[in-house]
Amino acid sequence: MRKRIAILGSTGSIGTQALEVISNFPESFEVEVLTAGNNADLLIQQGMRFAPNVVVIGNEEHYGKVKDALSHYPTKVYCGDQAIAQVVAFDTVDMVLTAMVGFSGLRPTLEAIRAGKDIALANKETLVVAGKLIMEEAIRHRVQIIPVDSEHSAIFQSLVGERRNEIEKLILTASGGPFRGKGLDYLEKVTPEEALCHPNWCMGPKITIDSATLMNKGLEVIEARWLFGVAPDQIEVVVHPQSIIHSLVQFVDGSIKAQMGLPDMRLPIQYAFSFPDRFKSGFERFSFTDYPELNFEQPDTKIFRNLALSYEVLKRGGNWPCILNAANEVAVEAFLEKKIGFLGIPDVIENTLGKSSFVKAPELEDYFESDLQARRVAKEQI
Amino acid sequence: MRKRIAILGSTGSIGTQALEVISNFPESFEVEVLTAGNNADLLIQQGMRFAPNVVVIGNEEHYGKVKDALSHYPTKVYCGDQAIAQVVAFDTVDMVLTAMVGFSGLRPTLEAIRAGKDIALANKETLVVAGKLIMEEAIRHRVQIIPVDSEHSAIFQSLVGERRNEIEKLILTASGGPFRGKGLDYLEKVTPEEALCHPNWCMGPKITIDSATLMNKGLEVIEARWLFGVAPDQIEVVVHPQSIIHSLVQFVDGSIKAQMGLPDMRLPIQYAFSFPDRFKSGFERFSFTDYPELNFEQPDTKIFRNLALSYEVLKRGGNWPCILNAANEVAVEAFLEKKIGFLGIPDVIENTLGKSSFVKAPELEDYFESDLQARRVAKEQI
């Protein structure tokens, strides 16, 4: 039987690559639901090509356009965030790929889990904000969360057949981004255009900026903490400019396992869909002939402060990661709009944390409130 | 219940390290049988310290000495190869570590398998010579063969939880030995003393010379072919001077998994004993801080011809790997005795193959005959 997949965020980088993967295995995968925030044109094209049961356009302004364009197709068209959170629970959905950007992933991911759907998790902010709650719900509803982030997929793959309580340490690799090795003088003046040039990975703008500031790695540390149930001090980050080793697990006996390959997001996407099987792919293969040298160095958290901030909020816990995430989303947007400089991003986050109230054991609604409040405070810093 | 272990070859490099591992986990492991070929003194010491049920000294000349020394201990003392092949079948043995050198491992390993004992395989020659037969017997008797060689342990660990039919390629790493990058002019003159200085691993003399000639890697290719059921062209060798990545598996989706760590044979020995668990060890941990760079290059099979010869005999099959192994054992001994030069080793092997008769589908006794004959022919070349 084919696995029927709902893709939340189908017009983004992960979403479009997921559709490519699905179209490579028409006998195994089927598109059931597609959702997009604003990109109505691409959503319409995808709706025509993949004939899903439902498409949802988040921005209600585009509803008429999508509805009209697909009027002669069997696909149902809905709009709004509420609809996105509802369609993931449809009986006809087997797995939900959460590939939307930022905090907006939290509600639909939670709804999907509560409806018992397995999750291919590409929206790391969901776990950053509410990791404890999400993992508890996943256990309660016997849902599998399979990470799509290349680092977490690497760890997940390295842990297949192993016992979680035999993990000693997780080592997340970081490319170091386009500004690896640069000093504060240099970073002070970098433009969004420069920050958007990632050396190895082709991704959306938010995550590309997060890679340049190492915030992406900080968010991944928090994500890993919840996904794999380890303590913050069991997670290390090592800079590996070639992005070939995607991450590593060290076990209690001292043995280390790693997953490697060319940087290609289609691989972890396909793995999340095919797990526990692996499907034969036509992706270009890694060869040591092309990579005679692999390099590793320690991240400089004095210069890339976002990574240090991420560890701090993770250790403090409560609503602190939620506030870090919200402040970061606001700061990245302001940087892209050239309202603040590159080094202003950690300043905004730190100031926002300083002006927020700490909630030790937040409930779901506390996260929404903390998120809103943090965005307001962060905007005041800009 | 404690796992009762028989160590064949307890006085060698692997054997002594295995005893160290066992003594670290007295509540999990127990020494049941120890055997040695010639080193009576160390076998006596080990017998006193570990109080096994039985010790066997291979060389019958030393029987009286061992018997006398252990006369006030509860340990039974036997001698001769026949006894070694018998004690592995004792009811009180749960697992047999085959750590003797060379062809002599074949008979007792086979007896252990036929008695239903799980095997921790350190004697790669057993699989080189009679891989097909051994693996068939292991399946028939539902015996697990867990490799102890660091490369094969790496592959075994990378395959835990994975499906064997989803393997695309195995990549064995090779340190390249002490003569990596050297030309024929240089190699012509190297002495046994130089060849015995391995850059990363501390091992016995036979395997150290095999590492210097890359024969060790050739034997490992043959071992891997049988252990993991892949075709010869699914096995690659890459030179990796630091010996940190112990080997890799590429799967059909393009994903690669690797096992890594400092070069320390105690780890794969412990893993073979503790599998499927991992026990907390005090071994020094790997850190990227100490290894900021990992290097990889292609092996030069024009200079290190033993590796090319190994692929050839593996592809031809039958008794050819058995002959290669026998000729190599003779040639290595002659090199250590300074009767032939370093480059004479592949010559002896090639000439021996040229003068041997090919048996396409050998039975067990054919291997013993091929081995004897090949040794005779090889000695004529020296």
Image: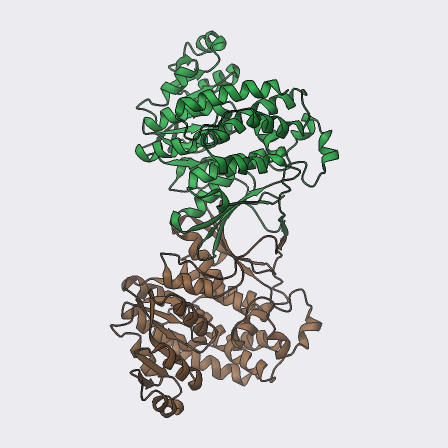
Chain colours: A brown, B green
Q: Nearer the viewer, residue A53 or B158?
A: A53
Q: Percent from the top left, x then y, of residue A296?
A: 61, 55
Q: Percent from the top left, x then y, of residue A37?
A: 42, 82
Q: Quadrant of the N terminus of chain A?
A: bottom left
Q: Is residue B30 above or below residue A227?
A: above
Q: Percent from the top left, x then y, of residue B94?
A: 34, 29
Q: Nearer the viewer, residue B1 or B198?
A: B198
Q: Nearer the viewer, residue A270 or B24?
A: A270
Q: Percent from the top left, x then y, of residue A219?
A: 49, 67
On screen, residue B151 versus residue B343, left or right, reads left
Q: Is residue A7 above or below residue B143?
A: below
Q: Is residue B166 visible?
A: yes
Query: Quarter of the image holding residue A129?
Result: bottom left
Q: Is residue A176 above or below residue B32?
A: below
Q: Nearer the viewer, residue B10 or B347?
A: B347
Q: Residue at x 34, y 67 (%)?
A: A29
Q: Is residue B282 visible?
A: no
On screen, residue A183 versus residue A128, left or right, reads right
